[in-house]
Image (tube, rainbow, N blue to C red):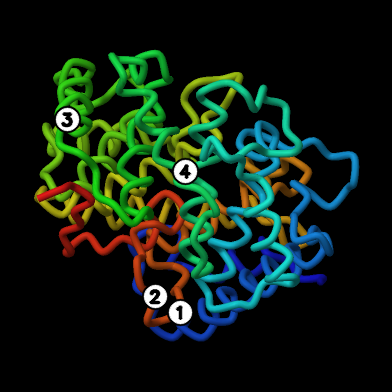
Amino acid sequence: MNFSRRKVLQLLPVVTGGVAMGDFDFLMIDNQKKVLEGVRSFFQKVANKDGTFRPGIANDYAGNSDTKFSGIAAPTYAVIIHKTFGWELPYEQATIDFFLSCQKEDGAFYAPTGEGDMELPLAKLYNTVQSVAALKILGIEPKYDPTPVITYFFEGNRFQDLPLYTTSFFALFYSAWKSKMPSHIDEKMRGYLMDNQTADGYIGDHVASTFHAAHYYRLIGEETPLAEEMVSRVLKDQKEDGSWSLHQPDWDVHAVYDALFVLKQVGGITNRKKEIKQAYRKANNWILKCQNEDGGFSHFPGDEPSDVDAVYFHVAALVESGYLKPVKGIENEEIYGWGHLMNPDKTYNCLIE
């Protein structure tokens, strides 16, 4: 696929500031179509007949962030993106069989490949939550009860040994699983989040852990504490180029997605709509510069190669901002990825009542 993304962007005032689209609507629609054509083409290039997906086009590419950590990440994000736009997976039954093959009798899912030690509790948590959600989206139940993976962390306070960017994993699990979250888990999680939140609304002084806190509260149907302060900090931290890449050398690979989630899901209770809209436009402009000629996305402009991890987080961010539109009629939208389809005007609740 050969098209000049940057040339098209130069014609699109919707992503460059507060200018109304007007007669440029047709250009925006055409570019949206090209973005999605590129994404679908990229997934076809990285799909394997066994139902898995490589992190990138090159066979020897190890991946980045989630796709480097776990071989379950790329298939999960492939499922989520395909179903977000109503696409059939290249080898859908094989993908279902792959997820089912990753679960053992202890209930946990184990990735067959990846940089992480798949026996560690963090790996079991990540792989199990992702797999349970992916299978639910595909209309399939796991072979074994996966809840022991979750309850392990609440035998005492083991969950506190996890990174702060994992807090919403538990709410996502219970949103996707057939039973609700027990009250004692929620009580511990809320107390932990409150203990780690600072006066500016942030958790751990980082937008990623802050996103997971906001994600957690949205999934349990409760208001996010210090929401106005949180939104103000997110708006303040956006860079002139539209990104939130504040912590080099890791460059906060998911920071733009995380920030847009907070603005969309929490920002509605603040009187900052104009600023939030401008932040969306700046972010869109930056994200679109990350799409490569192979149709995929890299985490940063000019940062090769394309990676399934970057594809999910950038495409999902474009959905959050309203630039890309999902297929209509999606059910259980809150379990798709990290919440890009959640309706900010809808109350979700994964708690036992």
Q: Quadrant of the N terminus?
A: bottom right
Q: Which residue is mark 2?
A: 330
Question: How far across and how far down the image is residue 52, in percent?
Answer: 75, 55
Q: Which residue is mark 4?
A: 129
Q: In this rendering, is residue 332 above or below 153?
A: below
Work out whether residue 195 or residue 159 is closer to the camera in this orientation and state it: 159
How much space separates mark 1 and mark 3, taking CA atoms?
A: 37 Å
How much space separates mark 3 and mark 4, taking CA atoms?
A: 19 Å
How much space separates mark 4 and mark 2, taking CA atoms?
A: 20 Å
> Which label sits on residue 184?
3
Closer mark to the observer between disc 1 and disc 2: 2
| Residue at image coords 44%, 35% | 244
Closer mark to the observer between disc 3 and disc 2: 3
How much space separates mark 1 and mark 4, taking CA atoms?
A: 24 Å
Closer mark to the observer between disc 3 and disc 4: 3
- Residue type at the position of mark 3: His
- First of labels 1, 3 by sequence position: 3
| Residue at image coords 44%, 74% | 325
CB-based contact (under 8 Å), mark 1 and mark 2: yes
- Residue type at the position of mark 2: Ile
Q: In this rendering, is residue 305 above or below 320?
A: above
Quarter residue 160 falls in: top left
For label 1, the crowd category at 10 Å Cα-Cα, with few meaning under 14, some 14 to 19 and many 20 or more, is few
Closer mark to the observer between disc 4 and disc 2: 4
Task: Residue at the far front: name it.
Answer: 105
The answer to whether any part of residue 266 appears in the image is no
- First of labels 3, 2 by sequence position: 3
- Residue type at the position of mark 4: Val
